[in-house]
Amino acid sequence: MVLVGKKAPDFTAQAVINGGEFVSEFSLRDYKGKYVVLFFYPKDFTFVCPSELFAFQEALAEFESKNVQVIGVSTDTEQSHWGWLQMEKNKGGIKGVTYPLVADTNKTISANYDVLVGSWDYNDEDEMTAQGELIAYRGLFLIDKDGIVRHQLVNDLPLGRNVDEAMRIVDALQFHEEHGEVCPANWAKGKEGMKDTHEGVAEYLSNH
């Protein structure tokens, strides 16, 4: 499901913020007026996931300077998030991560963003059945200040993401909003954009 251009599915769920504080009703709607980088990861206490969570933490100050709220989501419980956050990095933990980690324990957030691995159904005996682990793919969504999804990326479970690319997309959206120009291939902050016209494209290509 492509969510780009659509309203980001809202949610209210349990979460852990500031590295150890429980929040019973953490809601996406509370961040309207800010950009949001919402990313999903498969499981707590795994191996690829800490590298991503720490990469977002290392870039957190830069994201915040651009009015961006980073939010992580997995289908683990808030207690699992809390326990992992208390564990030292050299022991496989993520102590030091301070942005919110949302507990999607009923799988609805992952399902609404179409990043849920597997599915559930009922058999002929009216018993619930499941295919797959019902955990989240590595989805990432950039949501603008009006709550509209402007970018999405979904990786399979073994494939970690590039946080620098997430930052580049934030810069590209904000450049477009500020200047009204579009961002060509491999655009990066500090480079020229181009006008979204035949003449603008021709001028850009002739100069590059």
Image (cartoon, rainbow, N blue to C red):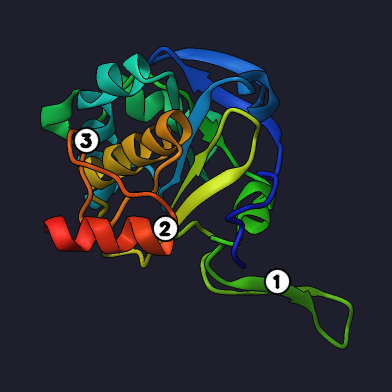
Q: Position of residue 158 (x, y in %)?
A: 27, 65
Q: Nearer the viewer, mark 2 or mark 3?
A: 3
Residue 189 seen in this snapshot: yes
- Local packing at callout 2 (Cα closer than 10 Å; few below 14, some 14-19, many 20+) is some
Which sits earlier in the primary sequence, circle 2 or circle 1? 1
* Total numbered badges shown on the rendered structure: 3
**Residue at image point 20% right, 43% down:** 188
Distance between mark 2 and mark 1 Cα atoms: 24 Å
Q: Which mark is residue 120?
A: 1
- Quadrant holding the C terminus: bottom left
Q: Residue 183 or 121: which is nearer the viewer?
A: 183
Q: Which mark is residue 153?
A: 2
Q: Nearer the viewer, mark 2 or mark 1?
A: 2
Q: State if disc 1 and disc 2 touch (CB < 8 Å).
A: no
Secondary structure beneath label 3: loop
- Quadrant holding the N terminus: bottom right
Against 37, residue 155 (above or below) is below
- Local packing at callout 3 (Cα closer than 10 Å; few below 14, some 14-19, many 20+) is some
Distance between mark 2 and mark 3 Cα atoms: 20 Å
> What kind of residue is marked 3?
Lys
Q: Is residue 118 left or right of residue 74?
A: right
Distance between mark 3 and mark 1 Cα atoms: 43 Å
**Residue at image point 52% right, 47% down:** 150
Against 122, residue 68 (above or below) is above
**Residue at image point 68% right, 54% down:** 112
Q: Position of residue 129 (x, y in %)?
A: 71, 75
> What kind of residue is marked 2?
Leu
> What kind of residue is marked 1?
Trp
Secondary structure beneath label 1: strand
Residue that badge 3 annotates = 189
Q: Residue 178 or 101: which is nearer the viewer?
A: 178
